[in-house]
Amino acid sequence: MAVDLLVLGGTVVTGRPDGRVLFEGAIAIADGAIAAVAPRREVEAQYAAPRTIDAEGMIVYPGLVDTHTHLYQTLLKGLGDDLPLMQWLDASTLPSIPHLTPHLCYVAAALGCIESLRSGCTTIFDYMVDHRDTEIYDAILQAFDDVGIQGVLGRGLRDRQTEAVQLNLPSFPDQLADCRRLLDRYGPERVWVTPGATWAMEEDSLRAARRLASDRGTRLSLHTDEVLFDSEESLRRFGQRTVPFLERIGFLGPDVLHAHCVQLSEEDCQILAQHGSCVSYNPVSNMYLGSGVPPIPRLLELGVTVGLGADGAASNNSQDMLEALKVGALLPKVAWRDPAIFTAADALRVATVGGAKALGRDDFGTLEPGKRADLFVFDPLHAKSVPVHDPVSTLVYSSGEVNVRTTIVGGRVVLDDRRIVGIDEDAILREAQSVALELSEIADTRRRVEARLTVAGS
Ligand SMILES: [Zn+2]
């Protein structure tokens, strides 16, 4: 049978619920989907393709899914170190946002998507903040296509300001109108409606966002109880903690992805579970900002869908999903003082099928016939990874971007033997360095860096 692509040989970690691993396996890919996952000799006997990837000695994993990031923040690495969330917003992200342009957002998104592919990530959910220049959203969606990653854009909404930094926001009706424009142009699978957080929104605006998403059949995402301030402010303004408040106004549902959920109470966890909610677990960011440890094991126990996010590179400071995988597996062990509370298999599940489900999808996340061909080929022959006893443990605890050799998104080879195919990577890296420095000058966000560095010759 003729197919488009064969991945032959090596160990195939299917990511299926039964934990099935094939040694000397192979994958046949046709029309962007997996046609077969089977022992190599069977696939070789049944399928022929114009291209074959030799995976002998390699390990093949399902592509990782990043369920929460802010790609524009790849330009802000290192500008907000050692600050808690609200001060970090005022010091690094909020002063930068007004100076973003479509070109800057394109370069930032391309940079983040390149790093994602290099860390085995094949699908990314990008929350892009509200902005007057609405072409920035189109620029990010263009970067997804050019780099070749599967990208979903959350169109940010906001109608309340912090005192320290006042943004020149478009009116809320204009923000909603731009959501409709993007939904018309790209469809509900690629564009979601995403209010920033309850503290950044009026109650009526949250209700309007929910109505728009329900009317258009798209999904919602917001930052939920990332820090103590969220529920304190919700109690002050609405008389209820964040989650019970969202329940009262009819915002909750299985189509809502809650980022962070660090400060949930037991009651909050149960309410989220009752509504079939989805949560993005962003461990590196939660540690970087000192936000706390989200109750991920409890949420999973209650049946909440959990995905794994890198979060923006201003609070990470990378988009490395392999790093998020390891940190995400370790953090609950520390918090619960129990090494069995969250295993490597739990981490891989959350980062693959959990992420797909959190994005409302069941067509990727495992390597099985009929699923999208989203996968990566991993070369274990590096000092960090040798020897391999358990390929799931190897990926979660003993891996890095250096291992990721080839990444395939929807059947298309987008990282080909360590080379990014769709875009001039070197040009993007150089441009990102240049525009990031310019942005930090214009936004005046370099003061804290300059205060801690003594630069030779100055
Ligand atoms: Zn975020």
Image (cartoon, rainbow, N blue to C red):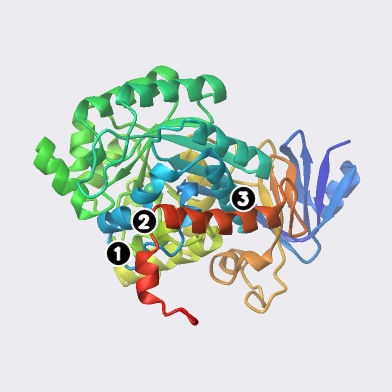
Residue annotated with mark 1: 83
- Residue 392 pos. (x, y %): 58, 63
Tags 2 and 1 touching, CB below 8 Å = yes
Give x and y (percent) for residue 396: 54, 65
Quarter that holds the N terminus: top right
Image spot of residue 20 (x, y percent): 63, 54
Question: What residue would you read off at disc 3?
Answer: 63
At a point 63% along the width and 51% down the height, the residue shown is 62
- Label 2 secondary element: helix
Camera sees residue 262? no
Viewer-side residue, 76 vs 344: 76
Compared with 149, 296 (above or below) is below
The image shows residue 317 at horizontal and vertical percentages of 46, 62
**Residue 401 located left or right of residue 9:** left
Q: Amino acid at mark 3?
A: Gly
Question: In the rendered image of this protein, does residue 399 appear above or below residue 132?
Answer: below
> Is 59 on the left or on the right of 292, as rendered?
right
Identity, as a three-letter code, of the amino acid under mark 1:
Leu
Q: Is mark 3 within 8 Å of ligand 1?
A: no
Q: CA distance from mark 2 to mark 1?
A: 10 Å
Q: Earlier in the sequence, mark 1 or mark 3?
A: 3
Q: Disc 2 marks which residue? A: 92
